[in-house]
Image: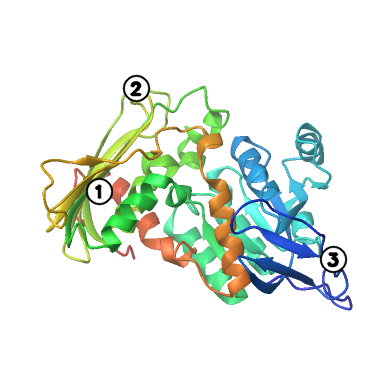
Amino acid sequence: MPASPPGEGPRRSRSVLGPGPGAYHLNFNLNAGTEAIRDGEKRSVIIYGVAIQGTGWVASAHLEAARSDPRCRVVAVGGSSVDSASRFCADNGLDAAAYGRIEDLLADSAVDVVVLATPNDLHASETVLAAQAGKHILIEKPAALDTESLDRAVQAVAAAGVTTLVGFVLHWNPMFDLIRAQIDKGLLGRIFYGEINYWHEVGDWYSGFAWAKTRAAGGNALLCAGCHAVDALRFFTGSDIAALSALATRDGTAHEYPSTTVFVCELASGAIGKVSASLGARMPYQFDVDLLGTEGSVRNNRLYSRQLPGLQGFVEFPVERPDSADVVSHPFTGELGHLFDCLDEGTDSKLNLAGTVNTHHACIAAEISASEGGCRVELPLA
């Protein structure tokens, strides 16, 4: 929960009224916190001061998510310079403090939560700084590009006791909700095989391509983008990856690293899986999920189950699929709302930093395996 600066009373709140089911009706009570009625239940609500560190493409999506949630207001923006942060505020009609150094942004007592929407190579070090400043953190994926910086970030978060959420935003996609619900109902039985593919042409159209294509800042094909597929395999199977073997190739793109990678893996549950990521696929964005279980199977938004008598084939559900790389279509509102739910309830997310270590280790292990001709690599990495 956000803390008041030393010597001050509780943080001041504002009155808002959100539309629709689950909306908050907040009553004025500026000196003693805020009361809210949500779904008929009266509870105390604090308005979180949010800072967005970064001024690029994804930062704009996080801003819109914050604007849609009555539990927060954006109080600060950090950029590579004060001018870039000020331009971001002006371009988005935002009244917020502008900072050119993350240290200055984190020193702002109005900030309770910081969203790290910077290039990949900055996430780990910025997580350490934010944790040491006592801020709760939404970390864009990947949280780190190597095990050493990931370990430092995990340790800093644990020492500070702050709440974290790593940005695997597809958890709030309707197709993910649908698949997870069918699994939880037992319609697939025990999942013994999972295959997730992330295929997309990532090139000059992407405003961050200048850094994303580099090994230093982009990492590799899985860390840069395909980590969504690794995360999805773990999410749907409910299991960590225990070992993998990978191959990688170059596909004629400008990436400094092999931009197509595939691995097969053993999961701790006994299931096996396959993940592929191509950043050079000459095709529209495609994110495919295939799961085989002892009672049924899923192919994206299509389900077959022996638990549903009379089915003669797959049933197709008319649900939104994760078939666009445009951040405008990604469910950042659900993601940020989940973080606020965790803060309100004093709980941890399964997508907290420590909970995503296995995903990051798998992405790094795949590069190690591919560089050594597809050798078996066991997790966790040393």
Coloring applied to the structure = rainbow
Question: Where is 277 relative to 43, above or below?
Answer: above
Q: Is residue 132 visible?
A: yes
Q: Is residue 126 left or right of residue 293?
A: right
- The mark that comes first in sequence, 1 or 2, is 2
Residue 40's quadrant in the figure?
bottom right
Amino acid under disc 3: Phe
In the image, residue 139 lies at what x, y percent? 56, 54
Mark pair 2, 3: CA separation: 52 Å
Q: Earlier in the sequence, mark 3 or mark 1?
A: 3
Instruction: Sort mark 2 into few (<14), some (14-19) or many (20+) by Cα contacts within 10 Å.
Output: few
- Asked where in the image residue 373 lies, by quadrant, the reply is top left
Mark 3 crowdedness (10 Å alpha carbons): few <14, some 14-19, many ≥20: some
Tell me the mark number nearer the camera, choosing from 1 and 2: 2
Q: Name which quarter of the figure residue 85 lies in.
A: top right
Q: Secondary structure at mark 3?
A: loop
What residue is disc 1 on? 369
